[in-house]
Amino acid sequence: MPWNKKIFLATVFWAMFALSYAAICHAAGTKNIILMISDGQGIGNIMASDFYTGKKAVYESFPVKYLVTTYCDKGSYSPEPAWKSFDKNKDNPATDSAAAATAMATGVKTSQGLLGKSPDLRNAKNIVEIAESLGKSTGVVTSVQFSHATPAGMVAHSDSRKNFETIARYMIYESGLNVIMGAGHPFYDDNSEKKFWRSEYKYVGGEDAFKDLTDSDGARAKDGRVWKYIESAEDFEKMASGTENPLKLMGIARSATTLRQARSGDPQKIGSYLSTKVPTLSTMSKAALNSLSNNPDGFFLMVEGGAVDWANHSNQKARAIEEQTAFNDAVRSVLEWVEKKSGWNDTLLIVTADHETGYLWGSESNEFVLVKDKGADNLPEMFYHSRSHSNTPVPLYAKGKGSEIFKTMTDGRDAFFANLLSSFDSGFTGEYIDNTDIFRVMDAAINNDKKHI
Ligand SMILES: [Zn+2]
């Protein structure tokens, strides 16, 4: 055989080998990633909700558990000094939701208020963009306005989390998102009652964007698709039941800022003034999964319980329990979907928080005492020591394909926190990762990066 023919055949052989190897590697990456974030949730919120409902949240039995450090750019966490004085974690500069969302979505530590940008204002590639480059569908679901920091931080790039209108327009028209759901309806108040004056359009991208979304021909995104728009609780239920699964689904619940937390009534009493006119976070999550799972290449979905943070800021014990319980219900719905429709060989489910809010403990005095059980249907013994964010590590629970990658990311061991938690959940060894590692795990899993697997 002449040399040039040999070289030609060898080249063809190696090209075919490389292509099939790449195809196998690509196919073996995690197909679906679901990141669920309870905003402002420390371990105290999980305990309070468990004790009030008399049952553990589903994710507490997940095989992978770590603590997560949440500090933003120029911050730090070190277990020794943190547990020496009660005020250390409370007074340490803590992250906000924008910097924390950026860390989880891009792996970049940034300054407070920035979304999808490094401290020197360069755009950082986010997990939504990575999923889309692999041909996957993407979605964000929240119990607060969809242009708020956590959902926005998954997809947008902005110098300020307060640019709601610009961020919302980017999400609707420029991003490749397939599902957007949240509160922030311009015509409704926090009790889901129709307002007759002062419509608030900024959270949905301005008056023209809202008109475009709701008119007869709908709003067309950059990808050429038209958003299917829903807002009634019945329509959310319909999408959740799976009778109709549009490829591009926008749901704005009929409520001003949150689904339920900001409503009237006594915020220290469970169920006070509860309205059924808005969907639950669980219904929204099911609707999102039905729509996203149209794509045979898989999806990335972020679900946020956004108002645990708001209840904690206002030191509302009952509302914090309601919001955490609603988040837990959403996780259960997602878990049931995975087990029925996809299985753990295809899907990675991560449940965590972006930071702790309220410095919630089980004693009124300045002591590290866990929230205390007073029996089901009774408010537990729980006391807020702050109205802002703290630097206390938050728990992370994971299950499914790629969850084993977390063990390659540990930064250290917080023996004091593990010891404190042992009476409630002995699954925490105290080993902690950083919130930027959540991005690294998702990125390695979705790309089947052999360095980590
Ligand atoms: Zn907050």
Image (cartoon, helix red, strand yellow):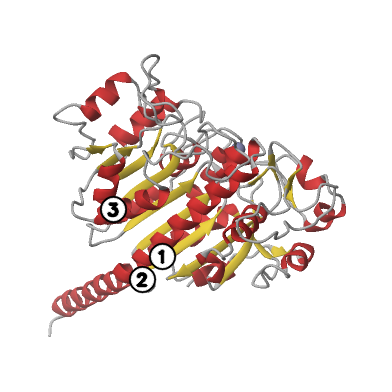
Q: Earlier in the sequence, mark 3 or mark 2?
A: 3
Between the C-alphas of marks 2 and 1, the distance is 6 Å
Residue type at tag 3: Ala
**Which secondary structure lies at badge 1?**
helix
Q: Residue at x 28, y 49 (%)?
A: 237
Image position of 142 with respect to 35: above or below = above
The image quadrant where one finds ligand 1 is top right
Tell me where residue 253 sits by quadrant.
top left
Q: Residue at x 58, y 43 (%)?
A: 319
Could you tell me residue 93's position as x and y percent?
Answer: 73, 39
**Which secondary structure lies at badge 3?**
helix
- Position of 93 with respect to 265 (left or right) is right
Between the C-alphas of marks 1 and 3, the distance is 14 Å
For disc 1, the neighbor class at 10 Å (few under 14, some 14 to 19, many from 20) is some
Image position of 414 with respect to 305: above or below = below
Q: Residue at x 21, y 74 (%)?
A: 16
Q: Which residue is mark 1?
A: 335
Q: Are marks 2 and 1 in contact (CB under 8 Å)?
A: yes
Q: Which residue is mark 3?
A: 240
Residue type at tag 2: Glu
For disc 3, the neighbor class at 10 Å (few under 14, some 14 to 19, many from 20) is many
- Position of 328 with respect to 54 (left or right) is left
Q: Which tag is nearer the camera, tag 3 or tag 2?
A: 3
For disc 2, the neighbor class at 10 Å (few under 14, some 14 to 19, many from 20) is few
Viewer-proximal residue, 4 or 336?
336
Is residue 164 at least partly visible in the picture?
A: yes
Q: Are marks 3 and 2 in contact (CB under 8 Å)?
A: no
Residue type at tag 1: Leu
Viewer-proximal residue, 370 or 393?
370
Q: Which residue is mark 2?
A: 339
